[in-house]
Image (spheres, rainbow, N blue to C red):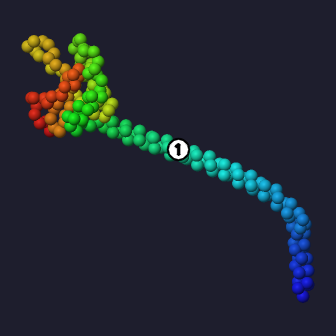
């Protein structure tokens, strides 16, 4: 009985191969090119995945650098007041304008003060520049940079960086 059943199944199998247009020996040969094509496509997909992962890693690093740069620029763009005379003194120690040769005209003295103001702005700080003209003597008495710290006005000569509290104003805000 098992023999008959096996023979019937074999006949059905041969009949199905015939309907499909191939013989039992052909099926293994037909699968071989499909397997090599699939292997090639798999290797190509894996290579593309690896390249995409490399590109993604580079983009993440670029994003981190850009995010840090944006945060740095935003902190400077808004500008802020110095928090203390110590912070101002530390910043002035890094600013080299006072180390330049002594100004020999009022214009060059005022330009040095403007240069300090520009450097402070570049580093995210707000300072002002002023000069005092004496009407009686018809002369500029001083040119100074000014910073508001905790409501008090501090000033310094851009050529010396010696910080003093403005004696006339007191607490402003």
Q: Position of residue 101 (x, y in %)?
A: 27, 15
- In the displayed structure, 87 sits above or below 135; it is below
Name the residue: 19% across, 25% down: 162
- In the displayed structure, 71 sits above or below 165; it is below
Instruction: Answer few, some or many: residues within 10 Å of disc 1's Cα (few below 14, many 20 plus, some between 14 and 19).
Output: few
Locate the C terminus and report the quarter of the image it occupies. Answer: top left
Q: Position of residue 146 (x, y in %)?
A: 20, 28
6 vs 106, left or right, is right
What element does badge 1 sit on? Answer: helix
Q: Quadrant of residue 133?
A: top left
Locate the N terminus and report the quarter of the image it occupies. Answer: bottom right
User: Which residue carries the number 1 mark?
Assistant: 59
Q: Position of residue 160 (x, y in %)?
A: 21, 22
Name the residue: 14% across, 17% down: 141
Q: Nearer the viewer, residue 12 or 165?
A: 165
Q: Quadrant of residue 170?
A: top left
Name the residue: 23% across, 17% down: 109
Q: Position of residue 135 (x, y in %)?
A: 10, 15
Name the residue: 90% across, 65% down: 25
Q: Nearer the viewer, residue 18 or 113?
A: 113
- In the displayed structure, 129 sits above or below 125; it is above
59 vs 12, left or right, is left
């Amino acid at each position: 009985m098992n023999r008959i059943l096996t023979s019937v199944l074999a006949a059905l199998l041969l009949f199905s191969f015939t309907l499909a247009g191939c013989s039992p020996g052909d099926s293994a040969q037909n699968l071989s090119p499909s397997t090599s094509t699939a292997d090639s496509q798999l290797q190509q997909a894996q290579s593309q995945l690896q390249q995409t992962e490399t590109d993604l890693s580079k983009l993440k690093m670029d994003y981190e650098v850009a995010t840090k740069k944006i945060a740095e620029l935003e902190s400077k763009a808004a500008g802020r007041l110095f928090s203390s005379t110590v912070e101002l003194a530390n910043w002035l120690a890094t600013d080299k304008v006072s180390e330049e040769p002594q100004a020999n005209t009022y214009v060059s003295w005022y330009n040095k003060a403007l240069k300090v103001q520009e450097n402070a702005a570049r580093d995210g700080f707000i300072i002002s520049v002023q000069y005092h003209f004496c009407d009686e003597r018809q002369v500029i008495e001083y040119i100074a940079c000014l910073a508001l710290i905790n409501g008090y006005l501090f000033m310094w000569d851009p050529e010396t960086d010696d910080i003093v509290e403005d004696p006339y104003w007191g607490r402003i805000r």
